[in-house]
Amino acid sequence: MYFFICKKVIMNVKKYNAAFMAISTVITIISGVYFFYHDIVQGKISEKFETCSSKMVIIDGEARLNLSLTFMLEDKSNKGIVNVEGTSFINNKIESIIDRNVEFSYIKTENGYNFTSTKIVPLKGETISPEMAMLKLPLIYASKGGELNYTLLFFPGKGVLFTLGKIPRFFCETIS
């Protein structure tokens, strides 16, 4: 008798376990489809702007710029700020300090993003002259109205790869 009761209980548990697994699977599939549609198809993940930072070196003959760029993009207003900090060297001797905020607007185009600087704000401690900045920095970081076109590849939680065409230029790492 005890054997039959145990067998019946085990059969009921197996039935409920199978039903629970079926319901869990359906809920998981529905959730997956919802999040895929909501986040990927509607662009919530694939183009989510985040604050990110990148370091780069620009070399031109005997001159070298060690730069740190910190991008803060606002996807609703299509505006942002990039903080440009660094040091300019000539023959391995410090020539000037760069420390500025560049406000910009951007437009998403068929081929990527068109960034246009709207305001250059030199910060306390910057020693590079405006003329030298125009010669050494990319135009968007040196003067109001400077433009640059990038294709952006988003890696959620990791950062953004800035490319010109298919050539990677720099990776901007997400700041937590």
Image (tube, grey):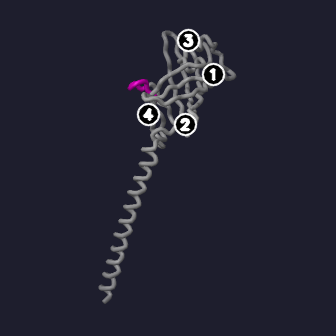
Q: Amino acid at mark 4?
A: Leu
Q: Amino acid at mark 2?
A: Asp
User: Which residue range is magenta in the image?
Assistant: 162-168
Label 4 to label 1: alpha-carbon separation: 26 Å
Q: Please name whichever residue, 118 or 69, is drawn nearer the observer in this view of the structure.
A: 118
Q: Which mark is residue 120?
A: 1
Looking at the picture, how far across and down is residue 41, in whole percent? 42, 44
In the picture of the structure, the residue carrying the numbered disc 3 is 135
Q: Please name whichever residue, 121 or 79, is drawn nearer the observer in this view of the structure.
A: 79
Residue 136 left/right relative to 164: right
Q: Quadrant of the C terminus?
A: top right
First along the sequence among labels 2 and 1:
2
Looking at the picture, how far across and down is residue 94, in whole percent? 59, 14
First along the sequence among labels 3 and 4:
3
Q: How many marks?
A: 4
Residue at the image position 45 percent from the left and 25 percent from the top: 169
Residue 97 colored magenta? Answer: no
Label 3 to label 4: alpha-carbon separation: 29 Å
Q: Secondary structure at mark 3?
A: helix
Q: Secondary structure at mark 1?
A: strand
Residue 90 left/right relative to 169: right
In the picture of the structure, the residue carrying the numbered disc 2 is 75
Q: Which mark is residue 150?
A: none
Q: Quadrant of the N terminus?
A: bottom left
In the picture of the structure, the residue carrying the numbered disc 4 is 153
Between tags 1 and 3, which lies in front?
A: 1
Q: Quadrant of residue 167?
A: top left
Against 76, residue 85 (above or below) is above
First along the sequence among labels 4 and 2:
2
